[in-house]
Image (tube, rainbow, N blue to C red):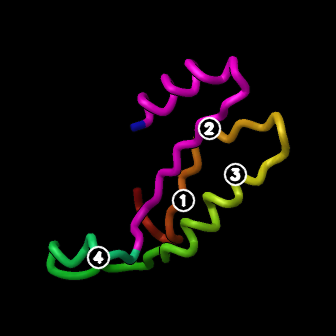
Amino acid sequence: MTGLAENTRREVTQWGVGVTLIAPGRVETPFWDGTGGLPPGELLTAGQIADSVVWAMTQPAGVDVNTVVVRPLGQPN
């Protein structure tokens, strides 16, 4: 996804279009239902990820936020 986002950014930036990759860590979603339950430790909420997206989208004109990595405190990787 990182490569796709960067290639897309390079293709469209000349027209004033920005591309932002949001890379979330562990998020409390139904994804975990098929894995036997939630992983140990802190998880982010969908609302916290949404807040990160809004932050990236509301930067001043001319600012291109390329990559936002959002993880809960304590997530090792």
Residue 62 drawn above or below residue 50: above
Determine which residue is flagged by label 4.
30
Dot 4 alpha-carbon crowd within 10 angstroms: few under 14, some 14 to 19, many 20 or more:
few
Q: Give the magenta-colored segment's residue range.
A: 2-27
Determine which residue is flagged by label 2.
66
Q: Percent from the top left, x then y, of residue 58? A: 76, 54
- Tell me how far mark 3 sits from mark 4, CA to CA: 26 Å
Which residue occupies 60% across, 23% down? 12
Q: Quick check: is 3 in the magenta stretch?
A: yes
- Tell me how far mark 2 sits from mark 3, CA to CA: 11 Å
Question: Which quadrant: the C terminus?
Answer: bottom left
The amino acid on which the numbered mark 1 sits, given as a three-letter code, is Val
* Residue 47, picture quadrant: bottom right
Determine which residue is flagged by label 1.
70
Whichever of labels 2 and 3 marks the residue nearer the N terminus, that label is 3
The amino acid on which the numbered mark 2 sits, given as a three-letter code, is Asn
Instruction: Identify which residue, 21 or 42, lies in the foreground.
Output: 21
Which label number is shown at residue 57?
A: 3
Which residue occupies 48% across, 33% down? 5
Whichever of labels 3 and 1 marks the residue nearer the N terminus, that label is 3
21 on left or right of 40: right
